[in-house]
Image (cartoon, rainbow, N blue to C red):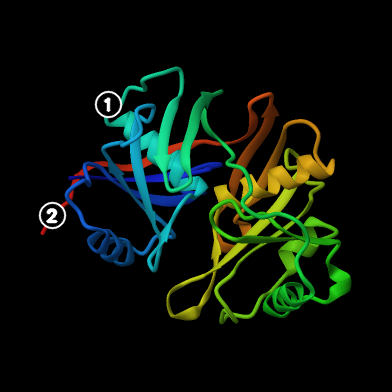
Amino acid sequence: MRLDLVDVFVNGALSGNPLAVVHGADGLSGEAMQSLARWIGFSETTFLLTPTHPEADYRVRIFTPTLELPFAGHPTLGSAYAWRAAGGVAKGARIMQECGVGLVPVRAEQGRLAFRAPPLRRSGPLSEVELAAALAQLRLAPGDVIEAVHVDNGPPWQLLRLSSAQAVLAVSPEATAREVVDLGLIAPSDASGIDWEIRGFFTGPGGVLVEDPVTGSLNAGAAIYLYESGLATGDYVAAQGRKVGADGRVYVSRDTEGVWIGGEVRAVSAGGELSSE
């Protein structure tokens, strides 16, 4: 089996979200995949498999160190990049990924890859109980939040919109996760070349709250929310990761086919041999 390490949503060297991609993983059990993802320790590790859908170019299973996800954004772009770099040729005009939420198209654009955002499985405002829990976890007051909504597209993201990028960057959440939730923060930015500032948090091993460097699924859910609410109308750029030493860029657009989440992917290590033992 081949193991690639790639960096997704980069804005310079080692500035995005790392991903491990295992090729030819049909012989691995789900338990073996989970064990390897835990050992590697990245936010996600993906396993490329023979597709079962006739339109798909490959099938992917996506694991965090503790669980399997039906969909995730930076693993989608990183897997597509690694599959193509290993000689994969799409059946059609676009790469078609098969994963837990179904088929996800990936296209090349301006030196980047972009996936079409899957539809939200849940939207609408957080309940009073959900909002109270999110505020406590993030150590925010009710007046700090302009709007709080569900943007669940596989991961059950809860998105809180604040007044400014400075307010987003100033948030200092509790280090221990109160419950298993995925929390996102977003606000408009006045920095050059950046339209929105985003941060994303999830529950890691041992119940620790982990901040993700750059999160494709959160950006995908946030984009649908921004477009549907009229807060975004044209293409925009989101920044994420500056509080954890990253500096990712996410390029978002919308056309008649849907919302597209794009970013640059770079190889860090390619073609390593992974033992099956």
Q: Which mark is residue 87?
A: 1
In the image: residue 52, left or right of residue 73: left
**17 vs 136, nearest the viewer:** 136
Numbered circles on residues, count:
2
**Residue sticking out furthest to the left:** 277
Whether residue 54 is visible to the viewer of this picture, yes or no, is: yes
The residue lying at 39 percent from left, 50 percent from top is 19
**Residue 43 occupies quadrant:** bottom left
Residue topped by disc 2: 276
Q: Amino acid at mark 1?
A: Gly
Q: Is residue 42 above or below residue 56?
A: below
The residue lying at 55 percent from left, 24 percent from top is 109
**Residue 34 occupies quadrant:** bottom left
Q: Residue 116: image x %, image y %?
A: 57, 34
Packing grade of label 1 (10 A; few <14, some 14-19, many >=20) is few
Whether residue 111 is visible to the viewer of this picture, yes or no, is: no
In the image: residue 79, left or right of residue 106: left
**Residue sticking out furthest to the top:** 93
In the image: residue 275, left or right of residue 155: left
**179 vs 17, nearest the viewer:** 179
The residue lying at 54 percent from left, 54 percent from top is 154
Q: Mark 1 or mark 2, which has the lower sequence index?
A: 1
**Residue 55 occupies quadrant:** top left
Q: Residue 263: image x %, image y %?
A: 55, 37
Q: Secondary structure at mark 1?
A: loop
Say if mark 1 contacts mark 2, CB within 8 Å.
no
Q: Amino acid at mark 2?
A: Ser
Alpha-carbon span between mark 1 and mark 2? 22 Å
